[in-house]
Amino acid sequence: MKFENICIHYNNIIRQSDEYDSVKPIRNTDLLLPEFYNTLVFCFNEYQKKYPSQRAYITESYRSNSLQLKYYKTGKSKIRKNGMHHYGIAADVAFIINDKLSYKGDYNYLRKIFKENNLTVLDWELGHVQFIPVSEQSALREEIENSV
Ligand SMILES: [Zn+2]
């Protein structure tokens, strides 16, 4: 059971949450796998050491399959359902600069920190970070399906 922690988190926290079917974007970090969230916080702090006037900011954490389908239909995502956001192991990140949401932070540096901490970034989505490599996604989906 390679992904046991993720399966337990999905079944015990995410599936029980009031936000499970939310059609609105969610920022609630309680729905993120704790070890993933803790690593993110560590990385955000590292980023802030170099850029004290900025902070990294999660724009979306968990994502329901209803919202995922909406993103698929509008071309915002290539995935129809069960993306890594749905399992609480992905986040979309922007920045707060001068008290405003901004996409003009140093993504290269932040992504470097993510990679150094064994997180996965995607070539085709600048602000996205996830807990497992893309190559392990189908194995995870299978394990979760068998655990539900
Ligand atoms: Zn994402």
Image (cartoon, rainbow, N blue to C red):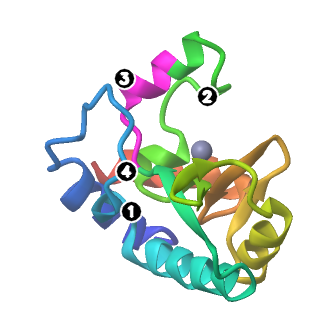
Quarter where residue 29 is shown = bottom left
Q: Is the residue marked 1 within 8 Å of ligand 1, measured from its CB?
A: no
Give me the residue at 47% from left, 27% from top.
Answer: 68
Tag 2 and tag 4, C-beta contact below 8 Å: no
Residue at mark 1: 32
Q: Position of residue 66 (x, y in %)?
A: 36, 23
Which numbered disc flags the more N-terminal residue, 3 or 1? Answer: 1
State the separation of the CA atoms marked 2 and 1: 19 Å
Tell me: residue 28, above or below residue 38. Answer: above
In the rendered view, does 86 fall on the left or right side of 92?
left
Q: Position of residue 43 (x, y in %)?
A: 62, 80
Residue 142 appears in the picture as rendered: no
Name the mark nearer the viewer: 4 or 1.
Answer: 4
Name the mark nearer the viewer: 4 or 3.
Answer: 4
Q: Position of residue 107 (x, y in %)?
A: 78, 60
Quarter where residue 110 is shown = bottom right
Mark 1 neighbour class, 10 Å CA radius: few under 14, some 14 to 19, many 20 or more: many
Q: Which mark is residue 79?
A: 2
